[in-house]
Image (spheres, helix red, strand yellow):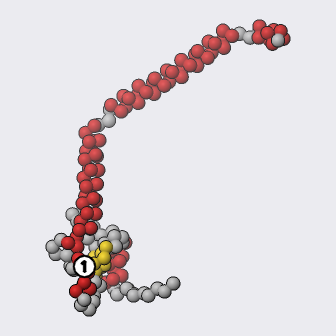
């Protein structure tokens, strides 16, 4: 124990304490500066732009939700190309497959692939590919027996 105290007697505790204090103050000053300049930078942001972006995001979200609701109820709206009892909702990549006359017990003379679009929405690339395949007659009826 005395040997340990002899080694410590030559150790400058005041210098170590000063070094630790200076490092702690430097760290605190750096944190304060980062916070201060970060807050100032945040205040320079144009809040009107942020509000505009929020309004645009809400507008797009409402349009998407409105389109999804329209897809679900489209078969019951006027002008739908087939009886609601003759269609099956698929959702993706097309909205409905229709079998005109099926609910009335009539022979099925055609099969309809129905895509519902609202507002200014356009066909996606995949929907265009499906339309092209149907229009060119590249449609098959497959029976699968596992």
Residue lying at the far left of the rendered structure? 78
Residue 117 can be seen, yes or no: no
Q: Nearer the viewer, residue 130 or 2?
A: 2
Residue 47 appears in the picture as rendered: yes
Name the spot of residue 58 as percent of width and height, x first. Answer: 27, 50
Q: Is residue 75 above or below residue 110?
A: above
Q: Nearer the viewer, residue 9 or 107?
A: 107
Look at mark 1 in the image and give the residue it sits on: 85
Badge 1 marks a residue whose secondary structure is helix
Which quarter of the picture shows residue 62? bottom left
Left or right: residue 2 versus residue 34 is right
Q: Nearer the viewer, residue 129 or 113?
A: 113
Which percent across, then down, holds residue 70? 24, 65
Tell me where residue 115 sits by quadrant: bottom left
Crowd rating for badge 1 (residues with CA inside 10 Å; few <14, some 14–19, many 20+) = some
Identify the residue at image location x=28%, y=37%: 47
User: Which residue occupies 25% across, 63% down?
Assistant: 69
- Residue in the image at 34% along x and 87% along y: 137
Picture coordinates of residue 136 (x, y %)? 33, 85
Image quarter where the N terminus lies is top right
Instruction: Classify residue 31 as left or right of residue 22.
Output: left
Q: Residue at x 41, y 25 (%)?
A: 36
Q: Is residue 113 left or right of residue 140?
A: left
Give above or below for 68 relative to 62: below
Q: Number of callouts in the render?
A: 1
């Amino acid at each position: 124990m005395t040997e340990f105290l002899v080694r410590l007697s030559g150790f400058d505790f005041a210098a170590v304490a000063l070094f630790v204090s200076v490092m702690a103050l430097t760290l605190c000053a750096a944190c304060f500066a980062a916070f201060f300049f970060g807050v100032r930078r945040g205040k320079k942001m144009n809040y009107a732009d942020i509000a505009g972006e929020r309004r645009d995001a809400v507008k797009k979200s409402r349009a998407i939700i409105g389109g999804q609701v329209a897809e679900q109820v489209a078969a019951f709206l006027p002008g739908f190309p087939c009886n609601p009892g003759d269609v099956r909702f698929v959702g993706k990549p097309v909205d409905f497959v229709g079998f005109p006359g099926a609910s009335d017990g009539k022979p099925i003379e055609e099969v309809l692939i129905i895509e519902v679009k609202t507002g200014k929405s356009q066909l996606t690339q995949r929907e265009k590919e499906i339309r092209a395949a149907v229009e060119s007659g590249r449609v098959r009826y497959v029976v699968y027996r596992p």
